[in-house]
Image (spheres, rainbow, N blue to C red):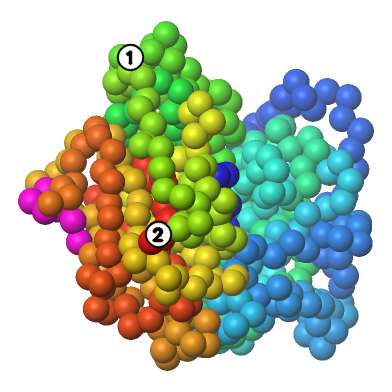
Amino acid sequence: MKNRKINYLRNSLLFGLIILINISCERDLSDEATNATFPRTAEVFIDAPVAMGSDFYFPYGGSKPTAWSVDSQVSYRGTASMRFDVPNANDPEGSYAGAIFRTEGAGRDLTGYDALTFYVKASQGVNIAEFGFGEDFFPNKYITTITNVSVGTNWQKVIIPIPDASKLVKERGMFRYAAGSQGTNSLGYTFWIDDLKFEKLGTILPLSASIMNGTNVTRSTFVGVTSTVTGVISTFNMPNGINQSVSIAPAYLNFVSSNPSVATVNDAGVVTPIAAGTATITATFNGQPTTGSLIINCTGTYVNAPTPTLNPSNVISIFSDAYTNVPVNYYNGYWQPWQTTVSNDFSVLGDNVLNYTNFNFVGIEFSSPTVNATSMTHIHLDAFIPGPITPGRQLRVIVVDFGADGVFGGGNDTRHSTTFTATTPTPVVSQNWISIEIPFSAMPGLLNRNNLAQIILEGGDNSILYVDNIYFHN
């Protein structure tokens, strides 16, 4: 089954931003910029949305869809501002606020600008998880994001550098944000944004860049199982003299493989192993080498998880190509602030696999609607760890029921955690599929299973975990 993901507070790792401005000379435009005829409108919101069309606000999954509005009572200057009401964490309409602002039509030519700027203030001192641009839901090629922005009760200017404006010939993703209540004891608050526009400042200086967060990361993988370069970060000297590190989309860089006969890499940082062996992926940004690398250790042909053989009438499937799956909110909610896990899902010979990289824990939610599994006796999943196993490595499987009200945090949620290690009857091993079967009778902490809504996997050490065939069965 294809993986549906939300982009909440991501990382993530949500690929981010920066800018490349030469102090002494103008940068040549990329080939795709030749003969560009797209509008060069700089303004996104000045008292009202500017040239955005009639359908431009797209909330993230799990966010409160009514969080954004136009406020005619508050403004930095002019007559109105954008208002964002971040909900309480247990708000049934959504546990956070987050969305993209995507202009209608083919997009805008932003090659003449070097930053997205705006003014912001909040009802109290808060840290906003993400501000950025470049996300249009497809292909999201040039996402640019700053994270953990400190916002006070007075208006302040925020500057988001454009990493390489020559690439933004027809950009549709004008703005993106994500804000939760992790730092406010799960209580909601409000913030306002005004004078949102692209500018040519000419006072932003790129300093350095890195991939894989500046480290040399080794991934054990298989032929045809793709990996994506992550942790793309660059540092800029901002107009106020402060150095700011930001995440940038891989497409802003130029990549090279040390051994293309083993693994190739495209301009979006997607690495495809094609033969057994080792290849090192490195990059340059603005002509300068980045720090960090991705070392691909391809061990050969991928082996699929065992094909389930149970009768479909005895199965409630969450993720499997062998059965029809129930509606799933997401397979990776990316729960801040501690989660490092990101998704790099793949398909081999028609078999779709959940691929969690930088795995420490991950949440799968299926709460719309919840699942009644009272007639089921077990939960099953297949897991595969392609890399080496550290001593004492554990894998925990947590099943969560939302209680009679069917909502998270309603006071009647119950859960049970089952831990597997190298010494248990179902050991955690490397390079082999682990078929995990847990009977509900062995879950005393799970008081009910009328409203099952989450499966949480924990115990990673920032390694890689493949998962397939997740289902309840009798």
User: Dot 2: what SS?
Assistant: strand
**Disc 1/disc 2 C-alpha distance (Å):** 38 Å
Q: Earlier in the sequence, mark 1 or mark 2?
A: 1
Q: Are marks 1 and 2 in contact (CB under 8 Å)?
A: no
User: Dot 1: what SS?
Assistant: loop
Which residue is the extreme one toward the bottom?
Answer: 411
Quarter assignment of residue 2: top right
Which residue is the extreme one toward the top?
Answer: 261
Is-magenta flag for residue 67?
no
Q: Which residue is mark 1?
A: 276
Q: Is residue 434 visible?
A: yes
Q: Quadrant of the C terminus?
A: bottom left
Q: Which mark is residue 473?
A: 2
Q: Is residue 137 left or right of residue 336?
A: right
The x, y position of residue 421, in whole percent, is 14, 53
Q: Is residue 232 left or right of residue 111?
A: left
The x, y position of residue 38, in whole percent, is 89, 38
The x, y position of residue 433, in whole percent, is 28, 38
The answer to whether 350 is drawn above or below residue 76 in the figure is above
Q: Residues within 10 Å of mark 1 (few under 14, many from 20)?
A: some
The x, y position of residue 358, in whole percent, is 35, 47
Q: Is residue 256 visible?
A: no
- Magenta-highlighted residues: 419-424
- Give the residue type at disc 1: Ala
At x 28% / y 46%, what residue is drawn?
435
At x 18% / y 46%, what residue is drawn?
428
The answer to whether 209 is drawn above or below residue 200 in the figure is above
- Give the residue type at disc 2: His
Q: Is residue 38 left or right of residue 179?
A: right
